[in-house]
Image (tube, rainbow, N blue to C red):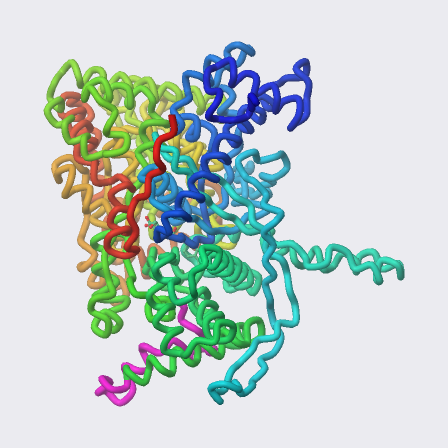
Amino acid sequence: VENLLSPYLGSDFKNLQKQIVYHLEHTLPRNTKTFQSFGTYLATSYTIRDRLLQLSHDTQKYYNEKKVKQACYISIEYLMGRFLRNAVLNLNLEEKYEQALAGFGYALEDIYDEEQDPALGNGGLGRLAACFLDTLATHNYPAWGYGLRYNYGLFRQSIGSEGEQVEKTDVWLQFPYPFMVENHFLRIPIGFYGSIETYVDEKTKGTRFKWHPSEYVIAQANDILIPGYGTDNTNTLRLWSCRPIEELDFDKFSLGDFKGASENRLNAENITNVLYPNDNEVAGKELRFKQQYFLVAATLHDIIRRLKEQKRTIYELPDFAAVQLNDTHPTLAIPELLRILLDEEMLTWEEAWDITQRTFSYTNHTILPEALERWPVKLISHLLPRHMQLIEAINWKFLEKVRKIDKNNGELTKKMSLIENSWDTLVRMAWLAIVGSHKVNGVSGIHTNILKNIVFQDFHSFYPNKFVNVTNGVTPRRWLHACNPKLSELITSTLKSNDWIYDLAHLSKLREYAENEDFQLKWAAIKTFNKRKLQAYVKKELKIDIGCDGVIYDIQIKRIHEYKRQLMNVLASIHFYLKIKKMSKEEKTKVQKRVSFIAGKAAPGYLVAKKIIKLINRVSNVINNDPEIGDLFKVVYLPNYSVTLAELLIPATDVSEHISTPGCEASGTSNMKFVLNGGLILGTLDGANLEIMENSGEENVFAFGITSKEVPQVKQRNIEQGAWNLMPEELQSILGIIEEGKFGEADEFRGLLEELKGVDRYITGHDFIPYIKELENVMSTYQKPHKWWKMSILGCAGSGWLSSDRTIKEYAEKIWGIKPCPLPKIE
Ligand code: 26Y
């Protein structure tokens, strides 16, 4: 029987057309007369989903037959970006779909643009998880992602008339999202609150515990199927949404209490309603804690269910699944697994603890003290009484060992205790994650060293083999092949092979072209092409005219945070603005033109970050409208930064800024994306910048400033002498100009300036002059095109190791003990 929907049957364009029309008429349903771009996007997407569903069934069947060990990545955030283009490219169907849609009068490129970008994450940590999923599928690793299906993703940002950030709800599920398959058969009850029963086990005569939750909700699975590039292996990202146990309380309804009747449903839906918009700063809200537990309880239940489906025993769990905790957000998985093993599977403590440690590993993504999670014992005891009891037991057994080496009358024991007594009694989630895992990793060389030698020093001495480094990486499929098609083609034609798309080390062969003038011209022309696209976007969306030829596109895109120092960036813009204003006509002709772009969201509760956004917009307004400046310099703030916007910006960048205070940025991943696309880096000696310098050559990076080791001295000096007294005059006068009200009311930015003048925690004053000098170096180097493009090509040629394929191979070997398991090819 001909099955129109079978992906194995029809991928010639006529079949694709039939499949698209089928979905248009039956799934949407629309008729061919009301065929619009958005409907076409949906119908096209459903044909992709059909293929992926079939491939994913085959993939799961095969993994189950082979009983291979799998990785389970638990993350409270995923920043997937748009799906359709990525899937079409990975399945190698772009030409066929172009042809199919052209037949209906549509350009595939425009259809891609109909898709919205699911923003189920905040920043680096969520995007890293998405890159990992792409790599895991591409390299045929048996792997699952687990996360939450929030009703509302990260807020949408616009800029108000005063230059301030305005937040709007992201209603991403208003229209169907065709790539997510609701799994109505998988419904898992999750408990909260309640009490603990103690009883004597008849067989062993030992004491046993049982938790009786007083409230339940249901976790429902929503699956996003993850295609790999050039493979049939299709993995699953399972996102849980929360449903009530009972939809409507009919008794209340009958009594006329309509509001009370749906209370249950509303309370349950609350749990997965919204993504917390905090990045690197703890909010400490009870609902967030509930989200974390909901995620891990549903996930562990699912993993154990799948283990048992293979008729394997619970003792085999560590050979069945390697569970990675993406930061401490899913750390409750540790006491939850222990509870299941002890209270439900009736294992002994020794057995249960051994299985737990062998199952989990933990990645740390940040050392900022304000981002380290600590939850009140009171809150945990109330919500999850049995888990609190287990955390205390883990702590007790762990501290027994610590006490043996504690020579300093309890000092070490106090420092290493999982429970802290400060303003409140708090559980240190990172400590719990370290103790309950067999491996802990940092995300770049410098970051792992800081973990080992400073932040987790005592734990490193205690468990010398537990800490490993796995430097981050990014997927070259999305971040070069898909977002920069022209550069992708040039690389493929130059290397006479597209092997680099799944083995990025091949890029090193570009080195021999670095000084080839013909190649440089082609390389530069592609940059210009991408810059024109951005130029058009800025004109259309912001009504700002910016130049392109001979103009440096200088970009800083990331969450707004004091440690990332967007403030230093805008202060430098004021510096250059004032400098140009003082110039004679003659001098002005020699100025290197530049546009400084900044984009990024601030957490709604992070007032300082919001002030920084406001200042940037005020400065931008003054500079862009000053006739004395003209097109010599522009400052452009791009609202609503997203994965999709990054895909437009990164290929169009000449130089990108990664200027965090040394020691603060764990790795950074956009720096990698820029280098891959021939952008140069202006950066501090921090995070992965350091490794980019090692691999692409120090001479190909614009680096400035001190090392992380020197930072504490500078801070100390600031505290002792006052940052104002140590501040260079140039910066002092810039602050003076802001205070005079040049960029809005004088009072507006007082708080920001007071911090710089007082303690200056992020040492902006100290780094200001070296930063300006390096920016000047960037500008003069741009005037030597041969040198510039050589640096750009060599940067890219040295970026083979930046692939998340390399990163995942290291996780697989050093931490997870998993191997690729490619599906046999079907003809
Ligand atoms: C607990 C809480 C509010 C919280 C929420 C989100 C804490 C941290 C985060 C997110 C952290 C994050 O995104 N960290 C980034 O991880 C990237 C991937 O490893 C790194 O490249 C980047 O340097 C780091 O800031």
Position of the N terminus, as image quadrant, is top right
- Residue closest to the eye, 548 or 67: 67
Q: Position of residue 237 (x, y in %)?
A: 46, 45
- Residue closest to the eye, 483 or 565: 483
Q: Position of residue 489 (x, y in %)?
A: 28, 19
> Which residue ends up furthest to the front in the rendered image?
1
Horizontal side, residue 229 vs residue 248: left or right: left
Decide: is 726 above or below 46.
Answer: below
- At 37% from the left and 35% from the top, the residue drawn is 228
Q: Position of residue 286 (x, y in %)?
A: 56, 65
Quarter-of-image position of residue 793:
top left
Horizontal side, residue 365 vs residue 468: left or right: right
- At 41% from the left and 68% from the top, the residue drawn is 429
Decide: is 343 above or below 308.
Answer: below
Position of the C terminus, as image quadrant, is top left
Q: Is residue 419 on the magenta stretch?
A: yes
Q: What is the span of residues highlighted in magenta in the rendered image?
A: 403-429
Q: Is residue 469 on the magenta stretch?
A: no
- At 60% from the left and 51% from the top, the residue drawn is 273
